[in-house]
Amino acid sequence: MPTTTETSLREAFVRARRSRSLVDIETLPVPADLEAALAVQADVSSDMGYAHLGWKVSITDGRGLVGLMPGPFLKPGDTYRSVPGAELRLEVELAIRLGRDMPRRPGNPYSRAELLEHCHSAFVGIEIIESRIADWTHVPFPLWLADAMGHGGYLIGQDVPFEVFDEVADLTCTVELDGDVLYDKPAHHANGDPLTPVLAWANRETESALGGLVAGQIITTGSLCGGVLAPNLGPVIVRLDPLAAISFALA
């Protein structure tokens, strides 16, 4: 049975999503642990009627974790419509689309090679971070996880060969907003290999309330440029040289 904290968070996040508004962090309790945070995600997803179309992954204290990406996904040329007053950040990422289910295998962990064998394709993606929490900069991690790690939206860009996961150091990320270059540096993934957090979640010790990895889902592997703050709205051009150039807009 959900705790009082889980119920309060579920109600607050569902209300914020439905009304396209932000929640004051001072009014939000913090989940007791990471399992409780994932349970809040699952409850919010159920209440909102979200499809489990994709995941963002990360590693915390050696443990794989996910945030639900329910879609609908953007494509190049689209406009992302944000909540008034929300802080937006942009993350240039590499992602995979599963071609086969990856059921949890206790005692028989997936290898990197097996993960790639389960993939249908790889592509460049752009995650838009837009938390339901106002002033979330110093949010406790379990509360951040309960809010799907701040997931706002996701743009699916050009397909790329799987070999790109071995060549991240050869890539350069550039983010331009309304004619101003906000970021222009070599690509860097916090875990070195972008597939590391995907494997950490695929090899999780216990099943979560959110469920497993299913064919057709996309998994975005984490930022190659940190979280680039968007100081204003307008047209965006993102480049992951030499692979892709993607244009869209923030509104």
Image (cartoon, grey):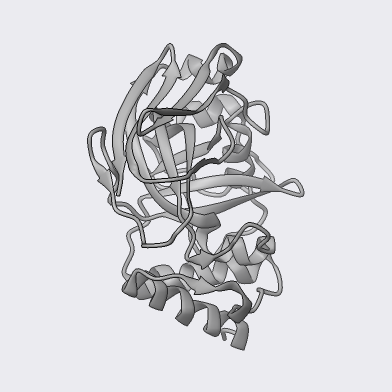
- Residue 75 pos. (x, y %): 26, 37
Which residue extends farthest right? 61
182 horizontally vs 245: left or right:
right
Q: Is 77 above or below relative to 14? A: above
Residue found at x 42% / y 62%: 85
247 horizontally vs 100: left or right:
left
| Quarter holding residue 59 | top right
- Residue 80 pos. (x, y %): 30, 48
Instruction: Please state the total of marks drawn on the protein image.
Output: 0
* Residue nearest the observer in this picture, 109 or 238: 238
* Residue nearest the observer in this picture, 127 or 79: 79
Residue found at x 53% / y 15%: 171
* Residue nearest the observer in this picture, 82 or 242: 82
Residue found at x 49% / y 14%: 163
Work out which quarter of the rendered image holds the N terminus and state it. bottom right
Residue found at x 56% / y 11%: 170
Q: Is 79 above or below relative to 40? A: above
| Quarter holding residue 217 | top left
| Quarter holding residue 158 | top left
- Residue 230 pos. (x, y %): 46, 43
Which residue extends farthest left? 77
9 horizontally vs 47: left or right:
right
Say whether residue 216 is visible.
no
Say whether residue 204 is visible.
yes
- Residue 239 pos. (x, y %): 41, 22
